[in-house]
């Protein structure tokens, strides 16, 4: 069965759908509520122009390929991640960005729409995916296809967030603010968020946020979780799976369980590559496999851009394919700070430069960490996959100064003054206490 899960902590993430509450500034009642809710309901996103949705998808794809190229450069190990989870979690964070931070994030993430159109477009895309999952669950084949997407925010108790920021997330991402106490007990908050991620991903992604990633200066974590479970439209012939050699990049060979399928599929080929599409139940989603020719892996990989992929997919035609494909399982764990900084958004990670003032009206927040975990298992029946991303947003701290020593063991002068206006109320000296 195929399962996809994504989670982002961005103090960023993906999980269930919640909403937030807010006057001009929201300072949630810590004692009574675990979730602060905006009075803004989630928008139905029925009036989003089709061109906005297309532009968003193109931008997300371009970012996905750019991030893939960064993760794969000079590396030969397996790679697996969820660009949608990363994009949607960072989009929630982007709602609070301004100035140079906003400009760099837009360029890096390929957010070409203005803020007032970007978030409704994400909402429309998100609700489209949600509708697929809901339609499948209401059908007789609900055990063959499942797709769930959810978002939530984790905020510091008593810390004030702008209502405009919370309203944007409530209306477009269904994300509400869950209150935790990073300041007093960051470890308890970390465990609570990790448990939420584990629950949303059916225990496939555990311990997403590592020890030490959240501290007493953390103020916000935005989370996104995606769960996908689907069977192939055309299952592989289970009894036909046999051990066959698989050639590695270094030319060495290893035996792997090779699956067999003979079916009419969308197929394409071009210079030094073949391409095939494997649909899942319901035929709404598919796996596209690109196979470079022997010895041409790097050259084909390096050519894959948004334009290249678009042309390759447009060139597919229905064709009977005798397909051999290995069963495989991949687990990955990434920190995305270096990647995103190198790809063009370093300011977001700089405590003295980041501008997330649209979150709280102050320039004191920055992204301290982004972690991403992913899991995929492909077999004869389908695909099981999970992914989670965590972006940690913290408050800027004052660098510690070298300590000074003051020993009052001789006569001294003192005064008592008004702090606000500087008026001196009392002045004196002590020569013999």
Image (cartoon, rainbow, N blue to C red):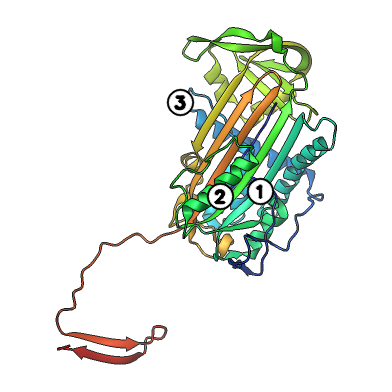
Name the residue carrying label 3: 74
Rendering coords of residue 275 (x, y %): 68, 18
Relative to the observer, which residue lies in front, 239 or 259?
239
Task: Residue 104: give x, y in percent of width and height.
Answer: 54, 48
- Up-down relation of residue 361 to residue 227 (above or below): below
210 left or right of 417? right
Query: Residue 398: x, y in percent?
Result: 38, 61
Q: Residue at x 61, y 66 (%)?
A: 28
324 vs 207, left or right, is right
Residue to which mark 2 is pinned: 192
Q: Looking at the figure, which quarter contains the N terminus?
A: top right
- Quarter that holds the C terminus: bottom left
CA separation in Å, label 3 and label 2: 37 Å
Q: Residue at x 51, y 31 (%)?
A: 71
Q: How many tags in the picture?
A: 3
Distance from disc 3 to disc 1, alpha carbons, whole Å, reads: 34 Å
- Residue 151's tag is 1
**Is residue 82 positioned above or below 177 on the image?**
above
Mark 1 / mark 2, whichever is N-terminal: 1
Q: Dot 3, how many residues are within 10 Å of its Cα: few (below 14), some (14-19), or many (20+)?
A: few
Q: Mark 3 or mark 1, which has the lower sequence index?
A: 3
């Amino acid at each position: 069965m195929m399962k996809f899960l994504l989670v982002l902590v961005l103090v960023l993430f993906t999980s269930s759908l919640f909403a937030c509450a807010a006057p001009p500034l929201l300072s949630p009642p810590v004692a009574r509520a675990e979730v602060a809710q905006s009075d803004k309901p989630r928008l139905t996103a029925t009036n989003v122009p089709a061109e906005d949705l297309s532009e968003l998808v193109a931008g997300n794809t371009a970012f996905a390929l750019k991030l893939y190229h960064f993760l794969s450069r000079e590396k030969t190990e397996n790679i697996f991640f969820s660009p949608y989870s990363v994009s949607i979690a960072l989009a929630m964070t982007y709602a609070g960005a301004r100035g140079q931070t906003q400009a760099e994030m837009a360029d890096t993430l390929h957010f070409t729409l203005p803020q007032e159109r970007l978030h409704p477009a994400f909402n429309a895309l998100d609700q489209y995916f949600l509708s697929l999952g809901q339609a499948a669950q209401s059908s007789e084949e609900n055990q063959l296809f499942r797709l769930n997407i959810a978002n939530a925010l984790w905020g510091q108790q008593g810390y004030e967030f702008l209502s405009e920021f919370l309203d944007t997330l409530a209306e477009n991402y269904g994300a509400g603010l869950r209150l935790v106490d990073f300041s007093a007990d960051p470890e308890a908050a970390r465990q609570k968020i990790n448990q939420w991620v584990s629950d949303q991903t059916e225990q496939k992604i555990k311990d997403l946020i590592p020890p030490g990633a959240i501290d007493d200066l953390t103020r916000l974590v935005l989370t996104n979780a995606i769960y996908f479970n689907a069977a192939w439209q055309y299952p592989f012939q289970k009894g036909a799976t046999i051990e066959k050699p698989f050639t590695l990049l270094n030319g060495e060979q290893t035996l792997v369980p090779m699956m067999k399928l003979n079916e009419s599929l969308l197929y394409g080929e071009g210079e030094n590559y073949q391409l095939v599409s494997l649909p899942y139940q319901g035929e709404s989603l598919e796996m596209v496999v690109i196979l470079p020719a022997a010895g041409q892996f790097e050259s084909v990989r390096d050519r894959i851009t948004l334009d290249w992929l678009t042309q390759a997919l447009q060139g597919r035609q229905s064709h009977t394919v005798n397909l051999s494909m290995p069963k495989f399982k991949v687990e990955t764990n990434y920190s995305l700070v270096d990647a995103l900084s190198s790809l063009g958004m370093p300011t977001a990670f700089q405590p003295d430069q980041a501008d997330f003032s649209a979150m709280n009206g102050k320039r004191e927040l920055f992204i301290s960490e982004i972690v991403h975990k992913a899991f995929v298992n492909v077999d004869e029946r389908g695909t099981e996959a999970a992914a989670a991303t965590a972006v940690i947003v913290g408050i800027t701290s004052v660098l510690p100064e070298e300590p000074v020593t003051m020993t009052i063991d001789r006569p001294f002068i003192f005064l008592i003054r008004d702090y606000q206006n500087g008026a001196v109320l009392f002045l004196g000296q002590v020569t013999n206490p």
